[in-house]
Image: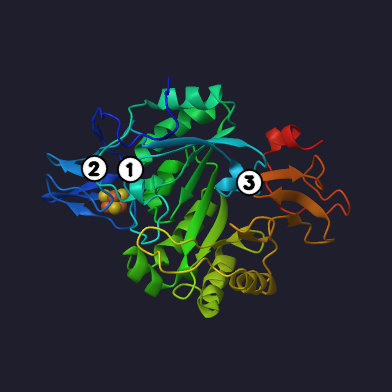
Amino acid sequence: MIAWYGMALDQAVVNRPVKAKLYSKIVDSVECTACSRYCRLKPGKTGFCGVRKNIDGDLYLLVYGLPAAINVDPIEKKPVLHMYPGARIFSLSTVGCSFACQYCQNYDISQRRTITGYHYDPEEIVEEALSMGCQGIAYTYNEPSIFMEYAHDIGVIARRHGLINIFVTNGFETPEAIDYARDFLDAATVDFKGNASDEFYRKYISVPSARPIFETLANLKSAGIHVEVTDLVVPEVGDRLEDARTMLERIMDILGEYVPISFLRFHPDYRMMDLPDTPVETLRKHHDLAVSMGFKYVYIGNVPGYGENTYCPNCGNLLIERFVFSSKVIGLDRNGRCKKCGYDPQIPLMKEKRADYIS
Ligand code: SF4
């Protein structure tokens, strides 16, 4: 059984690399196909994320069965706001990441390049999630596509036990990775940063372009996976409304007007301690822009008590009331329609779970 919660970075490691599924062989290298960096690795080399390595001509995942952080979180913390309000979600990460965000709040995990954690097989993760009374599992805190094979094996077992599976992701999955995730993935929160400006991605994340993230949105949608979007608005360097407009136009084209969008407040961390928290006024302007463009569900995140509730787009009735990470379904009936006007708000509450949260 799992004996700890939180981080296990100083735990002894049983390092048992497992052969990856997402890669192809090319001449004297392998090409990793888990994320859009498509690292080409010669024998002995490890990818940008630090957890996928060419060993004797094959690609191995170094963190299979090796979570570095585990917690039980409310689903609202992911945030997944339109799927299973109030659910308890067993949340885990490994070390490593495909991004190098200079403000990462989990940098001790994500930017760590030594393999560390505490050994747990997929079955043990699911057992623990069930014993903690969770309704789902989230792969979060670092980028889950880098440990996709581990997530896949947990997720398939979890689904068999009636648990939902959630990715909190930077959106850099390849089409091959999304295809592999169809077996188990129910929902993904795709996190944009700095209004998806390529300049921001290059300078503060070490990623050449945000373009692959939009392709991921389309691939998730066509795989039937519920998608929500966040955008971290970074004051002074990633808060331009013209960039936000371009990002929102592309999201609208791909996902339509009912996708939930949360504009998140930045908090200084890691190597970007010199910036202030995002002013609420800046977040409000982003919110209002999205509303003016026709999005039905626009939220503000990391500002307690502000921009958190869900209202009926037709009559304005309060549908879901939230405060920080708690929520209550108030205005929806058992068919998911507005109790006041009968409108279908296109909120895909888990049909088979509705009895859990609708009275
Ligand atoms: S998952 Fe890691 S090794 Fe694979 S392409 Fe992305 S950064 Fe490179």
Q: Which mark is residue 120?
A: none
Q: Is residue 111 left or right of residue 45?
A: right
Q: Distance between the residues labelled 1 and 2?
A: 8 Å
Q: Which of the two discs, 1 and 2, labels the residue nearer the N terminus?
A: 1
**Residue sitting nearer the eye, 180 or 126:** 126
User: Residue 283 at what x, y percent from top left?
Assistant: 60, 69
Q: Position of residue 32 (x, y in %)?
A: 26, 49
The three-letter amino acid code for the residue at tag 3 is: Phe
Q: CA–CA distance between discs 3 and 2?
A: 33 Å
Query: Where is mark 2, residue-wise?
Result: 114
From the viewer's perspective, is residue 118 above or below residue 34? above
In the rendered image, which residue does mark 1 sit on?
A: 95
Q: Label 3, on which residue?
A: 325
**Which one is in front, 113 or 334?**
113
Left or right relative to 191: residue 207:
left
The amino acid type, in three-letter code, at marker 1 is Val
Estimate the spatial distance between the alpha carbons at disc 3 and disc 1, rounded to whole Å. 25 Å
Q: Please tell me which residue is depicted at 49% across the width and 24% down the height of the picture.
A: 128
Query: Relative to the observer, which residue lies in front, 9 or 341?
Result: 9
N-term-proximal mark, 3 vs 2: 2
Q: Quadrant of the C terminus?
A: top right
**Residues tagged 1 and 2 counted as in contact (Cβ below 8 A):** yes
Question: Which residue ends up furthest to the top in the rendered image?
Answer: 1
